[in-house]
Image (cartoon, rainbow, N blue to C red):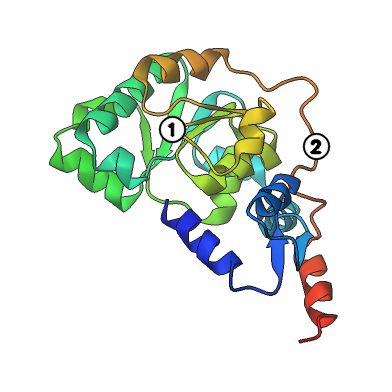
């Protein structure tokens, strides 16, 4: 993915590298990079914690007529899913099938909305609760209140873990492999049957690892290291 290409290039010209996970540190070592590497945690976790403190999840769910634990939150926006007619159809058919047993909530990305329209797939979302893109606070409230997430978003994969919600990842692979290895998330790609099956059968492990992304003080640690760095 473009993000990974940029990461590889940037890492090789940087003096300080701040890693969100221990696995990221290990991967850099495998690439021969050890100098200036610091495991600090993920700034996304910092943001989630601070946002969660001020959320009124009960009111937000009420505003969208949703009941906690009675719906699946979905996002779908990756170009390899939206721009491939076959993959998009498989995913929408799966979500539509899942929606027959549990409400599926889909805030629709503009790219996805256009792809659905261009391909004439409107009938495949008729039973899905379609929303416009949501502000971060509303999205996190809906995530916290959901039973499960189905997504191709790199960020939502992690935010689901922060929220204590398991996720099905509609990608062939993911940069956040530690969540797959921990059994918290599961890769389903654009496999219709697998999405339908795992939407109801996948549960996170009882002894799931905690603090994979640090302690919520990543920003503070980064600032301290930068302040103490000498050129």
Location of residue 42 in the rendering, given as x and y in whole percent from the top left corner: 70, 55
Of pointers 1 and 2, the one earlier in the residue sequence: 1
Viewer-proximal residue, 60 or 40? 40
Instruction: Determine whether the residue tagged by mark 2 lies in a helix, strand or loop.
Output: loop
Q: Residues within 10 Å of mark 1 (few under 14, many from 20)?
A: many
Residue 205 image offset from top left, x and y in percent: 72, 20
In the rendered image, the vertical position of residue 6 relative to residue 115, given as above or below = below
Does 69 appear above or below 28? Answer: above
Q: Label 1 vs label 2: CA separation?
A: 24 Å
Q: Which mark is residue 210?
A: 2
Say if 49 sits above or below 106 in the image: below
Residue extending furthest toward the front: 32
Mark 1 vs 2: CB contact within 8 A: no
Which residue is depicted at the point 20% across and 34% down?
A: 85
| Mark 1, secondary structure of its residue | loop
- The location of residue 92, given as percent across then percent down, is 31, 28
Q: Is residue 126 at all visible to an observer of this figure? A: no
Residue 225 is left or right of residue 161, and the answer is right
Q: Which of 226 and 145 lies nearest the eye of the viewer?
A: 226
Q: In the rendering, at what x and y percent does residue 211 appear?
A: 80, 43
Task: Read off the residue under disc 1.
Answer: 170
Image quadrant holding the C terminus, namely bottom right
Residue visible at 55% across and 44% down in the picture: 175
Q: Quadrant of residue 18?
A: bottom right
Q: Residue drawn at (66%, 37%), measured in percent from left and top? A: 178
Q: Is residue 103 left or right of residue 58?
A: left
Residue depicted at 29% across the width and 44% down the height: 112
The furthest residue to the bottom: 231
């Amino acid at each position: 993915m473009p993000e990974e290409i940029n990461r590889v290039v940037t890492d090789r010209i940087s003096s300080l590298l701040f890693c969100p996970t221990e696995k990221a540190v290990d991967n850099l070592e495998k690439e021969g990079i050890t100098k200036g590497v610091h495991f600090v945690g993920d700034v996304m976790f910092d943001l989630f914690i601070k946002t969660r403190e001020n959320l009124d999840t009960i009111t937000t769910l009420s505003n969208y007529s949703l009941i906690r634990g009675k719906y699946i939150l979905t996002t779908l926006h990756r170009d390899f899913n939206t721009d491939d007619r076959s993959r998009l159809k498989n995913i929408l058919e799966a979500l539509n099938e899942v929606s027959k047993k549990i409400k599926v909530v889909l805030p629709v990305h503009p790219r996805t909305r256009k792809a659905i329209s261009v391909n004439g797939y409107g009938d495949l979302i008729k039973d899905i609760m379609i929303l416009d893109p949501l502000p971060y606070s509303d999205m996190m409230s809906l995530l916290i209140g959901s039973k499960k997430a189905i997504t191709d978003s790199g960020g939502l994969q992690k935010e689901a873990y922060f929220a204590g919600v398991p996720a099905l990842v509609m990608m062939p692979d993911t940069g956040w492999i530690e969540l797959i290895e921990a059994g918290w998330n599961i890769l389903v790609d654009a496999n219709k049957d697998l999405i339908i099956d795992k939407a109801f059968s996948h549960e996170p492990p009882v002894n799931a690892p905690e603090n994979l992304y640090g302690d919520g003080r990543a920003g503070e640690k980064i600032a301290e290291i930068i302040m103490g760095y000498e050129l």
